Image (cartoon, rainbow, N blue to C red):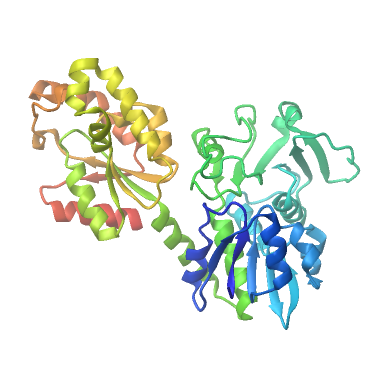
Amino acid sequence: MEYGLVGHPLGHSFSQEIHEAIGGYAYEIKDLDQNDFIQFMKEKKFRGINVTIPYKEKVTEYLDFIDPVAQEIGAVNTVININNKLYGYNTDIFGITDLIKRNIRNLQNKTALILGSGGTSKTAEFALKKLGCKKIYKASRKKRTENTENVTRYVTYDDLPFISEEISLIINTTPVGMYPKSETSPIDLDSFKKTEAVIDAVYNPIKTKLVYKAETLGIKSESGLYMLVSQAVKASELFSDTKIKNDLKEKIFNRVLKTRQNIVLTGMPGSGKTTLGKKVATITNKPFIDTDEIIENNYGHPSEIIKNYGEKRFRDIETEAIKSIMLNTGTVIAVGGGAILRDENIEYLKRNGVLIFIDRDISEISPTDDRPLSSDKEKLKKIYKERYDRYINTADIKIKAVDNIEKNVKKITEEFFK
């Protein structure tokens, strides 16, 4: 290959679409085990590569030149082949610096916590020092004794409750929470009462469990997609030996984000979510999923489940259906009218999606026999009153539906891509 990404595992990578959006070259993904990686580096059959976990430190053994910044950090993520000589750089430093600046303005006289001890943690530490961070804790599973630096202190995860109230910024550099094991979080944030921002280098899912938890606690937070785009732009400059305009970075970030995000339609039974969802999927070139259809295919029609086993059993099945698609990206999803009643459903849907509430007036919704919870007008009015605030409070976007499908579809797509 000429240009690409090497690492292991790489099923989660967004790098190909980012580099191809930058333009000018084809970009490949190579998932290499350790033996294949060694052989690949010895053969040198590439012009430029990005290197990700677990090889950011290992790759330095094969380089003829290492940029001083990468040398100081101790990790390389970009390699250029010039006349069969390999030159190593760290473009992650640009990405993580940009990501930090997006989430916390001033680190002077503040304390940061880095989770992890690998190559990305070294990059984060370097960035924090350059940004003037007063104190840095680095947490790892094993106790380290070299607490000799003025800025950096080494701790274990067991130590975190004792320092939690010092921490202004948390940066996760471990793969914990990364696709496909996205139900895990490296730490519990409940004791970090004074933390201002949480950053996660993981970018798939779009919101990791750690980032989502921070969001629910009112802490400014972001996963690593912007970091990925920023470092990719810098790597591309090295590949092509040209300067890329800064506004292209913003455009690529927004393009990749909107390509990968799910559009999740919520609203009352009979509000038209399925019909609108199918049309939105066609326009946005995204696949369509209806969670009621998943339930029906696996368990039978929702109305029969409710009649025979009760609403709680149906809600449990509904949660399992939603959980089964939580790792989907770039999908239009219509959920049942009561899906918003459970917090866990909201989390599963928001980790990769934007929730859009289809707010249709109750007078325009007709009760039907196949919906036992809203089979007549009185039941319909009752659940509308009970759920309306929940629809509003869980939605990222509200669309006031009108009696015109095309206009509603236009509103949904315009608001999503705004």
Q: Quadrant of the N terminus?
A: bottom right
Q: Toward the viewer: 27 or 418?
A: 27
Q: Toward the viewer: 180 or 256?
A: 180
Q: Toward the viewer: 408 or 296?
A: 296
Q: Position of residue 322 (x, y in %)?
A: 35, 35
Q: How many marks?
A: 0
Query: In the displayed structure, does residue 156 sit left or right of residue 404?
Result: right
Q: Is residue 250 visible?
A: no
Q: Position of residue 201 (x, y in %)?
A: 61, 49
Question: Which residue is depicted at the point 8% across and 29% down?
Answer: 368
Seen in the picture, residue 95 relative to 143 is either above or below; the reply is below
Quarter of the image for residue 231 reads bottom right
Q: Is residue 94 visible?
A: yes
Q: Position of residue 95 (x, y in %)?
A: 62, 60
Q: Quadrant of the C terminus?
A: bottom left
Question: Which residue is depicted at the point 8% across and 26% down?
Answer: 369
Quarter of the image for residue 265 reads top left
Seen in the picture, residue 372 relative to 170 is either above or below; the reply is above
Query: In the displayed structure, does residue 61 sit left or right of residue 350?
Result: right
Query: In the displayed structure, does residue 360 sit left or right of residue 290?
Result: left
Quarter of the image for residue 197 reads top right
Q: Residue furthest bottom?
A: 83
Question: Which residue is depicted at the point 85% across and 37% down?
Answer: 144
